[in-house]
Image (spheres, helix red, strand yellow):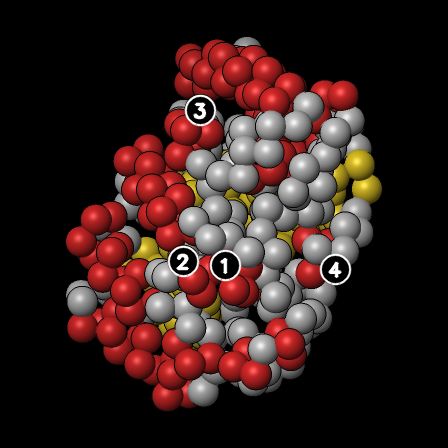
Amino acid sequence: MPTRKVDSKLHKIRDSAKILKESLERCSICPRRCGINRIRGERGYCRAGLQPAVYSHSPHHGEEPPLSGTRGSGTIFFTYCNMKCAYCQNYYFSQLGHGVEISIEKLSEIMLGLEKHGCHNINLVSPTHFVPQIVMALEMAVGKGLDIPIVYNSGGYDLPRTLRLLEGIVDIYMPDMRYSDDNTAKKYSDAEDYVKYNRGSVMEMQRQVGDLLLDENGIAEKGLIVRLLALPQELSGIKESLKFIKDRVSGNAYLSIMSQYYPTYKAYDFKELSRGVTKEEYKNVVDEAKRLGLNNGWIQERPRQQDVTFLGTNIKPKREI
């Protein structure tokens, strides 16, 4: 028998699903706003069609500790992306398009299967370009009893207007804050207006879910986690992003400061990206977080082994900030 909480969430999902499905007729769900008709099979910048495309799905034990817990985070890796990062560590499916198109019903079954396996949450990896399909799948899954937190794990190039339709549906937001300079975002990710939309999106996410809340076992229930990937020569401008987080998001924000960058895909086309991050570069970023009083979250050791398929999501934090 559905609880009032589930009934309320299902009602919200149905309302948002209707609006989002209509948006596919002239796609405007991300900052690209291509305007193509995905219902008729047209494809825009991200190359996503009408049906969701999934590369893999499984319990993941390498995410941040409150997400992975003891039973894993139920990750669903979506094919394609609305950015073109030269150094993408998941380029095999985000850029090269490997994966399988599935039905909305199949996506809902995947969600239910991950919950049945015991995963702590449903972790939607690179969901931005499939938000309508995800919400439609959630309508089915929640209607059949899905009742674990939903994690929106994005590259941060989202549209606040679309995110507002996810209020009351998504429990945990985990965006990247990849850049603090639009010229850099354009050069390495072909996203010339990244900073505006990224910062607006992070503020909207914080408004919806607030600071991270953990249960008695340290498992995330609701809230915001911001991922910050250190790049060589401090190209990502993390120090500026940290100041923005402190001043405009929350002084209690949970951060995941990542050192795992390594040159892959098209990174060698840029001399400045053709090496890893030095210990000093990474330390400078962590020290700045501490100086600003941003003490919640996790930092990493430099990766010793490189998993070329999933290093981009293999967090393995060393210790809390």
Reply above or below: 189 against 168: below
Which disc, if any, is residue 165?
3
Residue 92 shown left or right of residue 281 in the figure:
right
Q: In the rendered structure, which amino acid carries the disc numbered 1?
A: Lys
Residue bearing mark 1: 186
Front-lying residue, 291 or 319? 291
3D distance between C-alphas at marks 1 and 2: 6 Å
Tell me which numbered mark, 4 or 3, is placed earlier along the sequence. 4
Residue bearing mark 4: 92
Can the viewer see residue 146? no
Residue at the image position 34 percent from the left and 82 percent from the top: 283
* Label 2 environment density (alpha carbons within 10 Å; few <14, some 14–19, many ≥20): some
Front-lying residue, 286 or 192? 192
3D distance between C-alphas at marks 2 and 4: 25 Å
Tell me which numbered mark, 2 or 4, is placed earlier along the sequence. 4
Q: In the rendered structure, which amino acid carries the disc numbered 4?
A: Tyr
Residue at the image position 58 percent from the left and 52 percent from the top: 83
Residue bearing mark 2: 182
Quadrant for residue 273, please give it: bottom right
3D distance between C-alphas at marks 4 and 3: 30 Å
Q: Mark 2 or mark 3, which is nearer to you?
A: 2
Front-lying residue, 54 or 47? 47
Q: Secondary structure at mark 3?
A: loop
Tell me which numbered mark, 3 or 1, is placed earlier along the sequence. 3
> Are the residues tagged 1 and 2 within 8 Å (C-beta)?
yes
